[in-house]
Amino acid sequence: MARQKGSNEKSVPVKFDIPEGFRERSADLVGFFDAEHGTCRFIPTSAKAIDNGADARKVSALIICEYVSGPVVDADGEPVAAAEGDLVGLWYKPGMKGIANLRGEETILAYSHEIDTGKPNPMKVFRVYSRNEGLPMEINEDHRKTSKTAELPFPLARVREQSADRKQRYDDNDPDWVSQ
């Protein structure tokens, strides 16, 4: 592969065989679920807290999911293809509270209806389905700057410093400390 002038990327050949059944993984999101325009099927893994774009005093939560099926769009709302296992974001809304205890469990989310709350925009309500109860959702990444006092939809993951370069997370359902 020829390198383009000014490019910082270098092509490095893989020097080992990848065992059958393995596929490349990335922490990058492929896109975002378009939950209002189709049923979404996924495995929620974690959540990020960020300042809300419309009101910096409010918090937004982005649930990180392993994709199973459903409509996915890019940041501009254009459809994108996702493969099973890809990471996809789901912007959490109050009408999705059923997700709160489904971390690690395959979940189906279907848009149901709207409720007039007297605010400028109605609350969107979703139906949430799973085979089993999962673990409680938690915020693993807190990127808030202006909304630090806002209430979070999920608790922050409990983190203990073990050393300057290694953190460990405690899961209430697993008494052993698990490396993050």
Image (cartoon, rainbow, N blue to C red):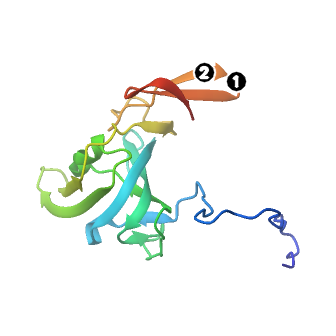
Residue 13 vs 176, above or below: the answer is: below
Q: Are marks 2 and 1 in contact (CB under 8 Å)?
A: yes
* Residue 179: percent from left, percent from top: 58, 32
The foreground one among 178 and 95 is 178
Q: What amino acid is at disc 1? A: Ala
Q: CA distance from mark 2 to mark 1?
A: 7 Å
- Give the secondary structure at mark 1: loop
* Residue 74: percent from left, percent from top: 48, 69
Taking the spot 43% from the left edge, 77% from the top edge, the residue there is 79
The C terminus lies in quadrant: top right
Taking the spot 66% from the left edge, 28% from the top edge, the residue there is 166
* Residue 3 placement: quadrant: bottom right
Position of residue 89 in the picture relative to residue 152 (left or right): right
Query: How many C-alpha atoms fall within 10 Å of the one at disc 2: few (<14), some, or many (≥20)?
Result: few
Q: Which residue is mark 1?
A: 164
The foreground one among 154 and 5 is 154
Taking the spot 81% from the left edge, 65% from the top edge, the residue there is 9
- Give the secondary structure at mark 2: strand
Residue 111 vs 158, above or below: the answer is: below
Position of residue 78 in the picture relative to residue 121 (left or right): right
Decide if residue 51 is in sight here. no
Q: Which residue is mark 2?
A: 161
The foreground one among 33 and 166 is 166
User: Which residue, as the protein is rendered here, is positioned at the far bottom?
Assistant: 2
Query: How many C-alpha atoms fall within 10 Å of the one at disc 1: few (<14), some, or many (≥20)?
Result: few
Residue 166 vs 22, above or below: the answer is: above
Taking the spot 33% from the left edge, 55% from the top edge, the residue there is 106
